[in-house]
Each structure stands twice: as C-alpha cells, then as structure tokens.
Amino acid sequence: MDMPPSRYKVVEKGRRLVVVDTLTGEAVTGDESARQSRIAAARRPARTGLQPREAFAPAAPSRSAPMRGAVAGIFTLIGFPVLIVGAVLVANARKPLRTGITGWLDGLEEAQALSSNG
C-alpha cells in the first residue's frame, strides 16, 4: 500500500524555497522574527571555557556554603569521636557477645532435642 500524497510541497519562488499547503494553495510561512533569531543564533559563537570576567571574578558562593561548613564542623567535633568510641566498644564486646549467642543457640538445640525425644 502506497502512502497518500503529502499535504505540503516545497517550491522555489524567487530563489527561495517556500512550503505550500496543497489544500489552500497558500504558502505556509513561519514568523519572520523566529527566522531572524535562528539566523542570529547560528552566527553567535559557542561559549567554551571561562569568559574573561569569570577568570578574574569567580561566581559568589551559594548561601548554603556556611551551613555546610557548620555541619562539617559539628560532625568533626562530635560525630567522629563518637564513631571512634563505638568502634572500640564493638571490638571489646565481641567475645562476650559471641559466648552469649553460642550459649543461647546451644540451649535451643538442647530444647529441640528434648522435644523430639519425648
């Protein structure tokens, strides 16, 4: 099955290509200002790297920068020592915890053996 003919066709009028609506016979034109902005955008150089002003005056820091510094300071003063103390406590508590858990599991095993025998 072939495609139906297109509603629009491109014709040349005065060394310019024009899109014509075949139903109305009129040229379908875009806004001239939109065409001019496309031409201007094509001529505008691409922005790459630092612009001259940014090279000597970098952008101002955001408002949240002091807050991030305060949070980092609080963590350093309070959080880090708490982490060190916690790591030491966990290291020292390993042996008693292991002994207690082993005893509890042995008790479960004995209870299960008694319930299956009698």
Image (cartoon, grey):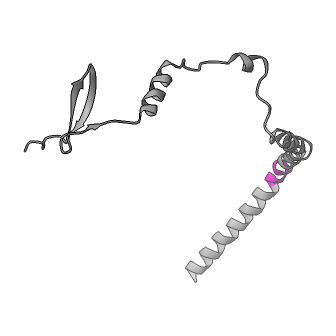
Query: For residue 57, what is the image quadrant?
Result: top right
Q: Nearer the viewer, residue 49 or 110?
A: 49
- Left or right of 114 in this view: 33: left
Query: For residue 51, what is the image quadrant?
Result: top right
* Residue found at x 79% / y 52%: 94
* Residue found at x 92% / y 43%: 77
Image quadrant occupied by the N terminus: top left
Q: Position of residue 30 (x, y in %)?
A: 37, 36
Q: Position of residue 11 (x, y in %)?
A: 21, 28
Vertical side of 43 occupied by 114: above or below: below
Image quadrant occupied by the C terminus: bottom right
Q: Main secondary structure of the magenta part?
A: helix
Which segment did they paint magenta? 90-95
Q: Position of residue 82 (x, y in %)?
A: 88, 48
- Left or right of 51 in this view: 31: left
* Residue found at x 88% / y 43%: 70
91 within the magenta span: yes
Query: For residue 66, what is the image quadrant?
Result: top right
- Left or right of 117 in this view: 35: left
92 within the magenta span: yes
Q: Position of residue 32 (x, y in %)?
A: 42, 32
Q: Nearer the viewer, residue 54 or 26?
A: 26
Of all residues shown, which one is farthest toward the right? 77
* Residue found at x 41% / y 36%: 31
